Amino acid sequence: SFWPLVAAVGLPVMAYGVLYSWWLVGAGALVTVVGFMGWAMEPPVAE
């Protein structure tokens, strides 16, 4: 599954946003939430 990777990409984007620009915090939070939701909604068994 690639969803944990998507969630992990959003966390450093949020950290860069704290340092450089606040809109990056929102973008990183959105990517992280989408990654966690995709990971949570994934079927528990392999297809």
Image: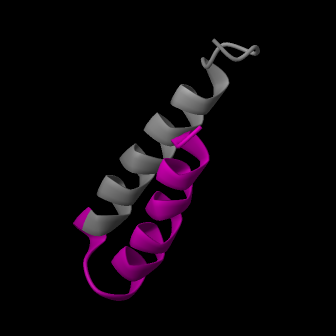
Q: Is residue 30 left or right of residue 6?
A: left
**Does 24 sit above or below residue 7?**
below
Q: Position of residue 12 (x, y in %)?
A: 48, 73
Toward the bottom, the furthest residue is 19
Image label count: 0
**Does 22 sit above or below residue 32?**
below
Residue in view at x 47 percent, y 77 percent: 15
Q: In terms of depth relative to the viewer, which is nearer, 43 or 33? A: 43
Q: Position of residue 27 (x, y in %)?
A: 30, 55
Q: Quadrant of residue 10?
A: bottom left
Q: Position of residue 44 (x, y in %)?
A: 75, 15
Q: How is the image coloured?
A: one colour
Q: Work out which quarter of the rendered image holds the N terminus and state it.
A: top right
Q: In terms of depth relative to the viewer, which is nearer, 46 or 29? A: 46
**Does 36 sit above or below residue 37?**
below
Q: Work out which quarter of the rendered image holds the C terminus and state it.
A: top right
**Does 36 sit above or below residue 4?**
above
For the magenta stretch, what is the residue range? 1-23
Residue in view at x 61 percent, y 31 percent: 39
Question: Quick check: is 13 in the magenta stretch?
Answer: yes
Residue in view at x 61 percent, y 19 percent: 42
Toward the front, the furthest residue is 47
Question: Quick check: is 37 in the magenta stretch?
Answer: no
Q: In terms of depth relative to the viewer, which is nearer, 21 or 13? A: 13
> Which is the main secondary structure of the residues drawn in magenta?
helix
Q: Position of residue 41 (x, y in %)?
A: 60, 17
